[in-house]
Image (spheres, rainbow, N blue to C red):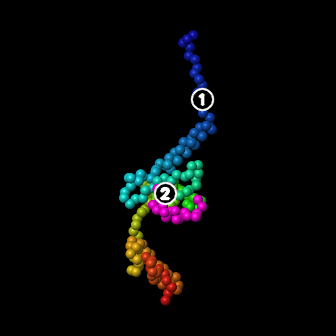
């Protein structure tokens, strides 16, 4: 008869192994989310004096670390001199960025010749204080050249046979042979 209820298709059963794979994939995605959640701020949004950083891109299909693109170098001629005569593998350190406070730092180009590991301050909070109160922090030497303005010097602790003195061209007092 037409009014007869017929059983529908049997619901598909998810195997325990499949369920475990799905759970593992979801956990991996959740764990990876904070690692990829940040990028350096756009260069046109930076305060004056802040370096522009861009994410480094490895050569296609490789983890090999090469020099930053020339348009990201502050001094391309200086980098050329640094790299002159070096094999490609010797130009830049082969870095793998570590985790700091649970956040994986990323390779960025920020004006130097080679990429560095970095994360913005809002991702990994850093103490960037510039003052230190210590009896070992001293002024530059009175005979220091003008280029030493703003240098931070430390009181030398000289070994036997040496005394505190000055080496021409230095910013700070040095240990020199005793007289």
Left or right placement of residue 136 versus residue 92 in this view: left
Q: Is residue 165 visible?
A: yes
The residue located at (60%, 25%) in the rendering is 10
Task: Give left or right: position of 11 versus 49.
Answer: right
Vertical side of 134 occupied by 29: above or below = above
- Quarter of the image that includes the N terminus: top right
Q: Position of residue 114 (x, y in %)?
A: 52, 59
Please give the range of residues in magenta: 68-88
Q: Using the image, determine if residue 151 lies above or below residue 45.
A: below
Secondary-structure class at tag 2? helix
Residue at the image point whose x is 51% and y is 85% from the top: 177
Crowding around mark 2 (Cα neighbors within 10 Å: few <14, some 14 to 19, many 20+) is some
Rendered image quadrant of residue 65 = bottom right
Label ID, residue 21: none
Mark 2 and mark 1 in contact? Answer it, CB < 8 Å.
Answer: no
Which residue occupies the foreground of this view, 17 or 167? Answer: 167
Of residues 118 and 136, the one nearer the viewer is 118
Residue 70, numbered circle: 2
Q: Name the residue at 56% across, 42% down.
A: 25
**Residue at 40% in and 66% down:** 130
**Residue at the outermost bottom position:** 179
Q: Secondary structure at mark 1?
A: loop
Q: CA distance from mark 2 to mark 1?
A: 57 Å
Residue 173 falls inside the magenta stretch: no
- Image vertical order of residue 66 relative to residue 158, above or below: above
The answer to whether residue 44 is above or below residue 161 is above
Q: Nearer the viewer, residue 22 or 168?
A: 168
Residue ID for mark 1: 12
Mark 1, Cα crowd under 10 Å, few <14 / some 14-19 / many 20+, is: few
Query: Residue 26, how many percent across, how many down?
Result: 54, 42
Using the rendered view, name the quadrant where residue 122 is placed: bottom left
């Amino acid at each position: 008869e037409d009014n007869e209820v017929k059983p529908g298709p049997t619901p598909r059963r998810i195997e325990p192994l499949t369920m475990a794979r799905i759970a593992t994939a979801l956990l991996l995605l959740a764990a990876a989310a904070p690692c990829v959640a940040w990028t350096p701020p756009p260069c046109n949004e930076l305060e004056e004096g802040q370096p522009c950083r861009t994410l480094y891109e490895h050569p296609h299909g490789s983890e090999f670390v090469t020099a930053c693109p020339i348009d990201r170098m502050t001094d391309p001629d200086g980098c050329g001199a640094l790299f002159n005569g070096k094999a490609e593998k010797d130009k830049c350190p082969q870095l793998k960025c570590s985790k700091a406070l649970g956040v994986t730092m990323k390779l960025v180009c920020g004006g130097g010749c080679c990429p560095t590991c970095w994360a913005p301050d809002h991702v990994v909070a850093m103490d960037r204080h510039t003052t230190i109160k210590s009896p070992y922090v001293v002024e530059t030497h009175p005979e220091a050249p003008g280029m030493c303005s703003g240098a931070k010097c430390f009181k030398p602790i000289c070994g036997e046979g040496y005394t505190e003195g000055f080496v021409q061209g230095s910013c700070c007092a040095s240990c020199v042979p005793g007289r």
